[in-house]
Amino acid sequence: MKNESTFIDVPAESSSAMKGKAPLIGVAKDHTTTGSGGYNRGLSIFDFLLRLAAIVAASVAAGTMFTSDETLPFFTQFLQFEAGYDDLPTFQFFVIAMSMVAGYIVLSLPISVVTIVRPLAAAPRLLLLVLDTAIMGLTMAAASSAAAISYVAHNGNQNTNWLPICQQFGDFCQKTSGAVVSSFVAVVFFMILVVLSGVALKRH
């Protein structure tokens, strides 16, 4: 009798223990996946809003520089004093680069929407990380080169006998300086976008 009771009890306990453990593992796994997806979706929404703000910053920078022409009121029939962005190759590069940046951000919006709909998809996020890093470099190059020219326009350079022109062309210098500031704001937005993409990929 003792052997029979032992033979009956042991399989019953091991079977119930195995049945009790199996669902717990599955529940824990689903909970972790859901939490990660919700966090990444929040990052994707913030990413989308930052892209909208970056479009405004890049467009303002390009538009302000493009409309920065100024002609002094005193001129004759044969001589007039005028300053414009197209007089300087650096400012021309600035307008072209910031226009490209604004166009890229518009094209990247659908990919950003995909990361909101599918927050656990790694491929769209990786693509945005690579492209954002490249465009951030272009934006920084345009902003830095324009800032150097704007500094010389404001302060001149005594070593090379370059005289400041902003005392005469005040509106021109004001618009170009505003465009440079707006472009650096766009650079900051891109830095944040790159960090967000890196954080989202790390959580996959």
Image (tube, rainbow, N blue to C red):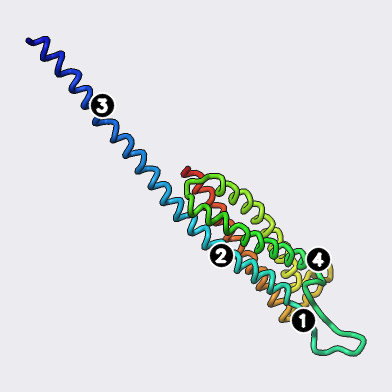
Q: How far apart are marks 1 and 4 (CA)?
A: 17 Å
Is label 3 or label 4 in front? 3
Q: What element carries label 3?
A: helix
Give the label on residue 70, or none: 1
In the image, farthest residue toward the right: 78
Q: Looking at the image, is mark 2 or mark 3 earlier in the sequence?
A: 3
Give the label on residue 52, or none: 2
For mark 4, what is the residue?
89
Relative side of 163 to 100, left or right: right
Q: Looking at the image, is mark 3 or mark 4 earlier in the sequence?
A: 3
Position of 193 relative to 76 (above/below): above
For mark 3, what is the residue?
18
Residues 19 and 103: in front is 19
| Circle 2 Cα neighbour tier, 10 Å, few/some/many (<14 / 14–19 / ≥20) | some
Residue flagged by tag 3: what amino acid is it? Met
Q: In which quarter of the image is residue 62?
A: bottom right
Q: Distance between the residues labelled 3 and 4?
A: 75 Å
Q: Distance between the residues labelled 1 and 2?
A: 31 Å
